[in-house]
Amino acid sequence: MARRAIGTLTAALAATALATTALAACGSSSGPTPLQVGQQWYSATARGDGSELCKLSTPARQRRFVEIAQHLPGGSGVSGCAAAVDFALKHYGGAARLGKFAGVHVRLVSRSSKAAEVQAANAAPLKLVRSGSTWLVAETAAVEPAAHG
């Protein structure tokens, strides 16, 4: 009888361990949260890091960066997302204006399973979409308003 109790206890502990491992794996396999991506976005903006901003963007957002740069004075020959972002960020004020995005507090405005919106104080909201296990910025006016404020 004692052996059966020990066997039952061992089986219960093993089942609990498996369930805990499965839950932990489930949580750890997910990518960054929308808030983390928003924080990364604003930090990259503050540093003027075009390459990082492109990595955090959807392909459509990357094309939009190129379009914006090509419509700026002297930007007609700009191609590629990182070069376009670098060009646009310099046009809109460079480090002096963009540094205000360093260390901003990002808050979650809304979130569903496929879309989210985050915002930092005095900045336009970032609209994110789910892409596999991560979130990417799909829409923002965060770069353009720097010329106004």
Image: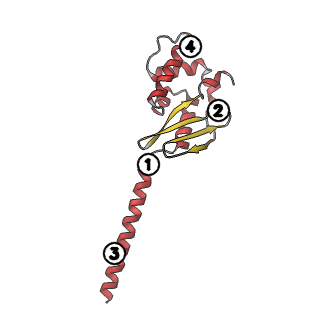
Asked which quadrant contains residue 38, the reply is top right
Which residue is outermost to the bottom? 1
The location of residue 126, given as percent across then percent down, is 57, 35
Residue at image x 60%, y 44%?
A: 108
Query: Dot 1: what SS?
Result: loop
Nearest the eye: 43 or 62: 62
Q: Which residue is mark 1?
A: 30
Q: Which residue is mark 3?
A: 11
- Name above or below for residue 37 compared with residue 88: below
- Name above or below for residue 9 compared with residue 107: below
Q: Earlier in the sequence, mark 4 or mark 3?
A: 3
Q: Which residue is mark 2?
A: 123
Q: Earlier in the sequence, mark 2 or mark 1?
A: 1
Q: Which residue is mark 4?
A: 72
**Amino acid of disc 1:** Ser
**Amino acid of disc 2:** Ala
Q: Earlier in the sequence, mark 3 or mark 1?
A: 3
Query: Dot 3: what SS?
Result: helix
The location of residue 94, given as percent across then percent down, is 60, 22
Task: Measure the alpha-carbon separation of dots 4 and 3.
Answer: 68 Å
